[in-house]
Every structure is written in structure tokens, then in C-alpha cells.
Amino acid sequence: DIQMTQSPSTLAASIGDRVTITCRASQSISSHLAWYQQKPGKAPKLLIYGASSLQIGVPARFSGSGSETEFTLTISSLQTDDFASYYCQQYNTYSGTFGQGTKVENK
Amino acid sequence: EVQLVESGGGLVKPGGSLRVSCAGSGFSFRSYSMNWVRQTPGKGLECVSSISGTSSYIYYADSVKGRFTVSRDNANNSLYLQMNSLRVEDTAVYYCTRGGMVRPFHPWGQGTLVTVSS
């Protein structure tokens, strides 16, 4: 199975900060990488797919990059609504492995 | 609007069985692979089972293989997960989600809580 390693597990940031989360796949997944946002008590919400394509309705301050095994999610200017947990996921195989998650907290 | 609605969660004793269901609407259900993803506080998100549109391909995570059975009824736009020999560690919120195999998981249902406890 493909393993997804996400870092950091927790990140403390302030409003307006640039935030970067990284995700590494144990083998090549091409660009079949998605990022999800999850708030407490809610289902995950798709933010980015195809490593860098923004899902409809997601603010442009979110962006994704990378390919093969190294990927990055960037929030260009952190807003109040962005305090949440973020997960990467490979969908190159049916196992659909997720990263361990990153909780973005208010500094 | 594309929508997924889970049902059937609840409290069950270790060794017991439970079936959770997912009703899809707003899209061509038979055209998409579907998945069950669970979330526990300790282990994050885990895709426990996936099924292709025609049920020709089925995936199970090692943690549930031999105990869980996924199925779908395309005529009624429904997805099912039959869970047998349940263990305490199967306690989780179970989400139904569309996608998989070169498609991202989107959207997700609201989730249904399965609690395995004596």
C-alpha cells in the first residue's frame, strides 16, 4: 500500500500568515493527490485535486503544487475561517490513503 | 445538487453486526465508484472499502477484510456496508463518499457514528 506522510501535525499561525503543509507519498502517485479541509463535527471538504486544481467555490488563497511523491498545500494569507484540520490523500489506487492530518491553530 | 446521506449507525456489542447505508442523489450513481471512509480520533481517516460502478472491483482495507462486505444497488442509488464480527476498534464515524481510482473523494455524506462497546 502507498503510505502518505504529512507534516507538520500541528501548526500555530496568525491571521494573515502564509501557511505551508507538506505531504510525501511512499511511491509515485503522478498528480492524483487531493487536499481536504475538516472542521470539528463536519465531514472533510475537498479543496484541491489533481495536486494543483482548485475545487469550485474554494477561495483562491488556497493553492497546491507538486507531483510524483512531493506535494504542498499553501494558504497565502490565513483567514479566521481557515483554522481547521487539513488532510492529503492519494487517489492513484483504490486504497485512497490519507495523510495523518495537520491541525492549524491560532497562535 | 449532489448529495450523500448515511444511515444505520448505532451502538452494538463486540462480535455483533450492523449494516450502514448511503443514499445518493443528484448524479448518475452507477457511473461512479463509491467508498466508505471511517474516522477515529486515534487513527485519522481510513478508506475501509471501495466498490466500482458495476461492482466489478471491490477493495477492502486489511483491517476489515473478511468481516465487512460492501455492496451497491444502482437501481435505488444506494450503497451499503455490512459489518460483522465488530470490534471495539471499529468504533468510528463512517462516511460515504463518491470517487476513487483517479477521481478525488467528493462529496462526502454527513457521517454515521458506529459505537462498538459492551
Image: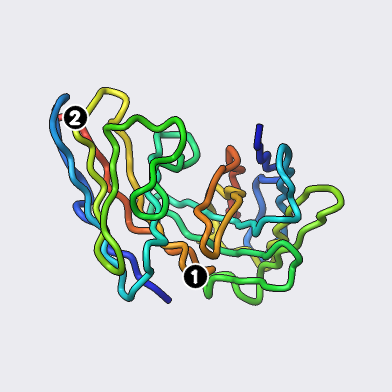
x 71%, y 67%: residue = B69
Q: Residues within 10 Å of mark 1 (few under 14, many from 20)?
A: some
Quadrant (top left, top right, bottom left, bottom right) of the N terminus of chain A = bottom left
Quadrant (top left, top right, bottom left, bottom right) of the C terminus of chain A = top left
Residue A45, position as x, y percentages in the image: 46, 40
Of callouts 2 and 1, the N-terminal one: 2
Q: Is residue B107 above or below residue B65?
A: above
Q: Is residue A33 above or below residue B8?
A: below
Which residue carries the number 2 mark?
A77
Residue A90, position as x, y percentages in the image: 41, 62
Which numbered tag is attached to residue B74? none
Residue A31, position as x, y percentages in the image: 37, 62
Q: Is B63 or B37 nearer to us in this picture?
A: B37
Residue B83, position as x, y percentages in the image: 68, 62
Q: Chain of mark 2?
A: A
* Extreme residue in the front direction: A53
Answer whether labels 2 and 1 touch (C-beta < 8 Å): no
Task: Name the amino acid type tagged 2.
Answer: Ser
Task: Name the amino acid type tagged 1.
Answer: Thr
Instruction: Identify the image quadrant of residue A7.
Output: bottom left
x 28%, y 68%: residue = A69
Q: Are marks 2 and 1 on the same chain?
A: yes
Element marked by disc 2: loop
Which residue carries the number 1 mark?
A93
Q: Is residue B36 above or below residue A63?
A: below
Element marked by disc 1: loop
Q: Is residue A30 above or below residue B43?
A: below
Q: Is residue A95 left or right of residue A12?
A: right
Q: Is residue A106 left or right of residue B31?
A: left
* Extreme residue in the right direction: B75
